[in-house]
Amino acid sequence: MAEKNLAGLRVLDFTRVLAGPYLTQMLRDLGAEIIKVEQPGKGADERQMSPIVNGQSGYFMMLNRGKKSIALNLKDPKAKEIIFKLAKQADIITENFKPGVMESLGFSYEAFKAVKPDIIMCSISTFGQKGPLSQRAGYDIIAQAMSGLMWMAGDPDRRPARSGTSIGDVNAGSHALGAILAALYYREKTGKGQYIDISLRDCLSAIIETAIPRYTMSGGTDKPGRSGPHHATMGPYGVFDAGRERYIVLGALNEAIWARLCTAMNRPEYINDPRFSSTTLRAQNLNETVAIIEEWLQGFEDVNEALDILEASSVPSAPVLDIEQLMQDQQFLMRDMIVEVEDPIFGKVKLPATPMRFSGTSVINNEAPPLLGGNTEAVLKEYAGMSGEEIAELRARKVI
């Protein structure tokens, strides 16, 4: 078996839905052991999320490959004892409940730190653990709306648009991974653990590119808004209609690429045209810029002919793929971005892989997701030192 970067690390995982499970899936793929704590009888929320086929949630399978599942009623005093026994042997604790929930259950960072001084705990929430909005109910779409991102997405004359995926959740999970790795490095140097507070909104506001400096550097006169399929301040850089329901993207953000694009389109007169002499001017004259390119594209019966010309001219460009095309793309497949998992109920299913590649270690993980509570007995015996009789008693009391 290939070596894993985080082999030997243990994570006690209270997360559910997307942001937290996405984080702990990456940690698992990097080699950490994930002990997922779930509600008896129901399990984590993502077990009920579509697509559901043969009683199995593809949403859950996508986010929980190779994890261990234990079922515990966290409100029971005995379950609390068990959690602290598990925490003593954990390196990292993850949760994405509404701020205050873990504390109300008796599972604050300070409580965990008391039993494991070097523990690293990561909380993910919509607005962060403190502040006037921290207690507001939140989902990814709330973070998108209040981050500035949604205001920037969509066509100028239409309503703001939600991203086609829950980008706030996966972006926060990715930032959380970086934060945890930084905390692990700090612990390696100092022996000290840390508490990590990740906000979906913060993470989205951090990636809206030049929107904030455009506003601040203009003294508030430049108010970034929706620019549709094209970049607001640089051009050409966007989605172009090639006719017959075909779309491509291309970018020509410096003058050398613009010259190559004009030559490829057999329109050399536009190379030195003052309307198009810089990326900023091409964006300011966006309608004309787009019209020139789309007129050329729509002259081809097969858009691939145009893409071949652009590629030969070293103009960055690509077709807009649908999911079926993505699943047939050789570059995507050769990078092992799809893993085939043998689920004990569903059977074989193809799922997205973690997108990191290392020269000496692997992130490929085709282990099945756990059955609800499927590892409870083994985990309690190994890490909580419990006997079969004690576990049977807990089962009878519906603690597990």
Image (cartoon, rainbow, N blue to C red):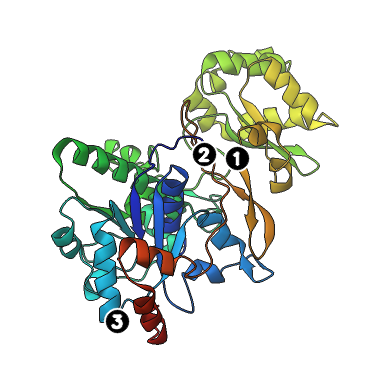
For discs 3 and 2, the disc positioned in front in the rendered view: 3
Residue 235 figure quarter: top right
Residue 133 can be seen in this image:
no
User: Of residues 150 and 201, which is closer to you in this image?
Assistant: 201
Where does residue 177 sit, x and y in percent of width and height? 36, 45
CA separation in Å, label 1 and label 2:
7 Å
Which structural element holds mark 2?
A: loop
Residue flagged by tag 3: what amino acid is it? Asp
Q: CA distance from mark 3 to mark 2?
A: 39 Å
Name the residue at 41% across, 47% down: 27
Position of 328 relative to 300 (above/below): below
Q: CA distance from mark 3 to mark 1?
A: 41 Å
Q: Earlier in the sequence, mark 3 or mark 1?
A: 3
Q: Which mark is residue 337?
A: 1
Query: Residue visible at 21% across and 37% down?
Result: 188
Q: Is residue 198 left or right of residue 159?
A: left
Look at label 1 and name its amino acid: Met
Q: The residue tagged with tag 1: helix, strand or loop?
A: loop
Question: Which residue is located at x 70 percent, y 43 percent?
Answer: 327
The residue at which mark 3 appears reads as 76
Residue 266's x, y, as percent? Answer: 74, 15
Q: Earlier in the sequence, mark 1 or mark 2?
A: 1
Residue 66 is situated, as x and y percent measured from the top left of the image, at 50, 53
Q: Please rate how many residues cluster around mark 2, counting C-alpha atoms within 10 Å: few if below 14, some from 14 to 19, many from 20.
A: few
Mark 1, Cα crowd under 10 Å, few <14 / some 14-19 / many 20+, is some
The reply to whether discs 3 and 1 touch (Cβ–Cβ < 8 Å) is: no
For mark 3, does the 10 Å Cα neighbourhood hold few (<14), some (14 to 19), or many (20 or more) residues? some
Mark 2: which amino acid? Answer: Pro
Q: Which mark is residue 355?
A: 2
CB atoms at circles 1 and 2 under 8 Å apart? yes
